[in-house]
């Protein structure tokens, strides 16, 4: 179908499934074990309902925001997803170009197919990019990656903390990963790996399962970039992260690809907001400590629910990947435009002219809990 016929982000997924080679589809779409968390990432948003307000003159609505002090055209950023070239020869550069055009922030993955420098070089002057870090057992490699990212102008460091070992994504494991084609994985530390068990296992054997809270001081000593922990799943860890002096957390279960039966990020958000208010007097959204959410976000309504409940912004993973599989950069642009259109309409219908007016009272999350 032509891009004009694409109406929503789900459409990109259906098309990606048709056009992608089996292996690529398996890697992108898979989640761990029985994929219960993957499903609940979507279902959780369906348990939240709106309480819109009327008669508020919504002629003009504005869904732009700032994320860690940087302008963003919407409260959405492109989350890190590895191996972009499985989907399209230009891989992550499709995301970079579309992000430039529409003022969206891209999080560059450690395991991008394109090299880090290629992605940064493709960015426009002033374009904001973040870096997602998998921590290598060899800290010298990690230090080099982090300091190089900072020197190239990357604005924030997202350390992935939910993947001491990669989850069992069985769809993906049934595919033998033959990345003899070096174009699919860039060189960032993936030598000497077992290629017999799917893409995820093949590329991730360098990740350090020994990573722990005591390492955070070391990270602070090697970079001035704000540090955000990606993959926090309960209020206790969010509180510890705040006390450890990091700039924020991403409430995420890695798109359902790690521990199955992890709760959705949006469900975790509620308990984090309650407990950080109660125990540290914080209110959200908060400039000093940002709460991000990802997993299962497919509509602006999903995003507005997260914002109402206190999130600064949400990360979107698969939909942006799927959007470039058949259409390259234009697909990603279309995906962003769809979200912008959805924001405009839904903010009008909600009676919110700015994101500040998207308040907790606008949602009924009383049935959000999964149990
Ligand atoms: C991911 N994700 C991810 N996260 C991370 O920290 N480092 C990584 O290399 C990857 N790679 C990756 C590959 C693929 C194919 C997917 C689908 C996801 C997780 C990602 O950043 C994000 O948390 C989820 O994708 C969010 O869920 P949705 O939007 O895909 O539902």
Image: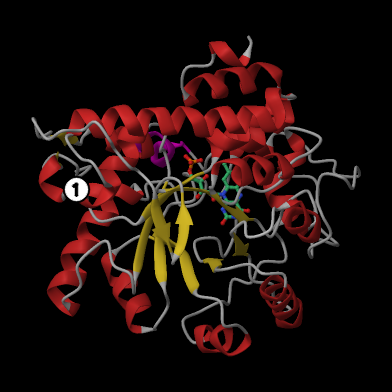
> From the viewer's perspective, is 336 left or right of 87?
left
Q: Is residue 76 in sight in this rendering? A: yes
Instruction: Please state the horizontal and vertical placement of residue 295, each as a whole percent of the image.
Output: 43, 44
Whether 245 is drawn above or below 290: the answer is: below
Q: In this rendering, is residue 164 above or below 75? A: below
**Would residue 30 be seen by someone viewing this image from the given angle?**
no
Residue at x-position 63% and y-position 86%? 222
- Horizontal and vertical percent for residue 120? 73, 58
Q: Front-most of 126 and 27?
A: 126
Q: What are the residue bounds of the magenta stretch?
A: 34-40
Image coordinates of residue 121 in percent, x first then y, are 78, 57
Quarter-of-image position of residue 88:
top right
Q: Is residue 85 left or right of residue 65?
A: right
Chief secondary structure of the magenta portion: helix
Residue 180 shown left or right of residue 349 in the figure: right
Residue occupying the point 69% across, 70% down = 149
């Amino acid at each position: 179908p032509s891009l004009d016929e694409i109406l929503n982000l789900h459409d990109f997924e259906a098309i990606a499934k048709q056009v992608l080679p089996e292996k690529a589809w398996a890697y992108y779409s898979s989640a761990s074990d029985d994929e219960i968390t993957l499903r609940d990432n979507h279902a959780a948003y369906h348990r939240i309902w709106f309480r819109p307000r009327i008669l508020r003159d919504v002629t003009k609505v504005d869904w732009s925001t700032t994320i860690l002090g940087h302008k963003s055209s919407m409260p959405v950023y492109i989350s890190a997803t590895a191996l972009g070239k499985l989907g399209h020869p230009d891989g992550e550069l499709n995301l970079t170009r579309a992000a430039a055009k529409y003022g969206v922030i891209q999080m560059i993955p450690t395991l991008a197919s394109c090299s880090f420098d290629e992605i940064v070089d493709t960015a426009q002057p002033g374009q904001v990019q973040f870096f997602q870090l998998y921590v290598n057992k060899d800290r010298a490699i990690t230090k080099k990656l982090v300091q190089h990212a900072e020197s190239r102008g990357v604005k924030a460091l997202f350390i992935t903390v939910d993947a001491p070992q990669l989850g069992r994504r069985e769809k993906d494991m049934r595919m033998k990963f033959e990345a003899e084609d070096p174009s699919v994985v860039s060189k960032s530390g993936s030598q000497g790996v077992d290629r017999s068990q799917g893409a995820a296992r093949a590329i991730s054997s360098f990740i350090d399962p020994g990573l722990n809270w005591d390492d955070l001081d070391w990270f602070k000593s090697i970079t001035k970039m704000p540090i955000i922990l990606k993959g926090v799943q309960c209020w206790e860890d969010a509180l510890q992260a705040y006390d450890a002096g990091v700039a924020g957390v991403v409430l995420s279960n890695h798109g359902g690809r790690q521990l199955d039966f992890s709760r959705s990020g949006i469900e975790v958000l509620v308990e984090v907001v309650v407990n950080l208010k109660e125990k540290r007097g914080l209110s959200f959204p908060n400039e000093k400590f940002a709460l991000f959410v990802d997993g299962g976000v497919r509509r602006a309504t999903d995003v507005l629910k997260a914002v109402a409940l206190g999130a600064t912004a949400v990360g979107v993973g698969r939909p942006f990947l799927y959007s470039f599989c058949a259409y390259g950069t234009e697909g990603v642009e279309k995906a962003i435009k769809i979200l912008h259109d959805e924001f405009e309409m839904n903010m009008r219908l909600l009676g919110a002219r700015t994101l500040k007016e998207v308040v907790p009272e606008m949602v009924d999350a009383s049935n959000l809990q999964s149990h």
